[in-house]
Image (tube, rainbow, N blue to C red):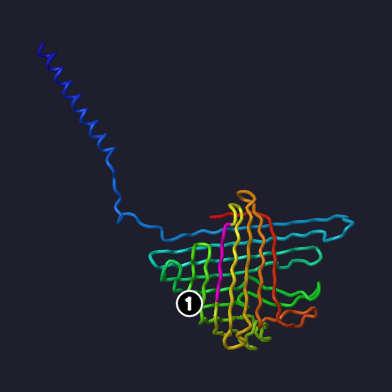
Amino acid sequence: MKYVFLLLALCSIRLYAQDKTVQGLRSESSRTIAKNANDTSKRTWKTGGSIALNLNQGALSNWSAGGDKFSLSLTSLANVFAHYKHGRNSWDNNLDMAYGMVNTTSLGQRKSDDRIDLVSKYGYELDKKWYLSGLFNFRSQFTKGYAYPTDSTKVLTSNFAAPAYVVLSAGMDYKPDETFSLFMSPITARWVIVTNDSLAAVAAYGVDSGKHVKMEIGAYASVNWNKNITPTTNYKTKLDLFSNYRHDPFNIDIFWTNVLTVKVSKLINMNISVDMIYDNDVPTVKADGTAGGPRPQIKQVLGVGFLVKF
């Protein structure tokens, strides 16, 4: 009989211990855990970009309407960015690149697009929309560019760092939201660089004959707008204005880029870009290969191809 009582006692102790364990687990699961603000950090960097590749090809054989037997065009667009924000300090970095080639049976290979545009801008927040800012901008191209007075002749007009434009500026930046910014500076230094000897010898792009660098002091403004118009449509524009205090300040240099991108599917997109440049120091090339007066330079590229965002 005493063994029966001993067994019942052991069972009672075990059940009591299990009950206490269950109660402890329930209490622990219902307890509210508060985060320590010092243990959590805000994200200060935002990085990403996109790469677009457009390809067009055509071939004709015994085509009565005429045309080139073979044509192939390839254009590429790339944009990468790195934005920093912590407290009142912000640092925006953006690199735009574009390159395109066209190859036809009759004309051979020619360049259709070429651009390098790097912008780095630091700002100190004065209030919610205004920043005291400093800006650095480098703009040039990758390879040689030519004008074609006739189908069989070409004239060198540009190369990498010929020209290149370097802007160093301090001013105010108005940013009401993440899609728009207006930078304004009354004092800006701009360097026009022409590293190619043959172009420098003819005073291309406003540099003095035989010189490779020309420094200008003036006023500068840059307008940037990057907006998703619809869930599948994005419009990006950048307008740079510069007035040289030392030479014809009322002749405003204009550099304006526009890119409209429409997403067709996850990887397929359509994009159209329109660029306009006006610089009073850059002459045009006439049909006979001689220099003409300054005129607005307009470039338009339309393509359908692949788009990858990261």
Residue 24 image point, x, y percent: 23, 34
| The N terminus, quarter of image | top left
Which residue corresponds to the image point at 25% horizontal and 36% vertical from the top-left? Answer: 27
In the rendered view, tell whether residue 252 sits above or below residue 51.
Answer: below
Which residue corresponds to the image point at 41% horizontal and 71% vertical from the top-left? Answer: 126
Farthest left residue in view: 2
In the rendered view, tell whether residue 180 sits above or below residue 215.
Answer: above
Residue position marked by numbered label 1 in the rendering: 171
Residue 152 as seen in the image, left or right of residue 267: right
Choose top left, top right, bottom left or bottom right for residue 220.
bottom right
Magenta highlight range = 221-228
In the rendered view, tell whether residue 14 sits above or below residue 295.
Answer: above
Residue 16 image point, x, y percent: 18, 26
Choose top left, top right, bottom left or bottom right for residue 49.
bottom right
Residue 211 as seen in the image, left or right of residue 299: left
Instruction: Tell me the amino acid under the disc marked 1.
Output: Gly
Residue 305 image point, x, y percent: 66, 54
Answer whether residue 223 is magenta in the image: yes
Residue 93 as seen in the image, left or right of residue 273: left
- What secondary structure is found at the residue carrying circle 1? strand
Residue 138 image point, x, y percent: 55, 74
> Label 1 neighbourhood size at 10 Å, few (<14), some (14-19), many (20+)?
some
Choose top left, top right, bottom left or bottom right for residue 224.
bottom right
In the rendered view, tell whether residue 246 sits above or below residue 23.
Answer: below
Residue closest to the eye, 235 or 6: 235
Residue closest to the eye, 103 or 306: 306
Dominant secondary structure, magenta: strand
Residue closest to the eye, 62 or 138: 138
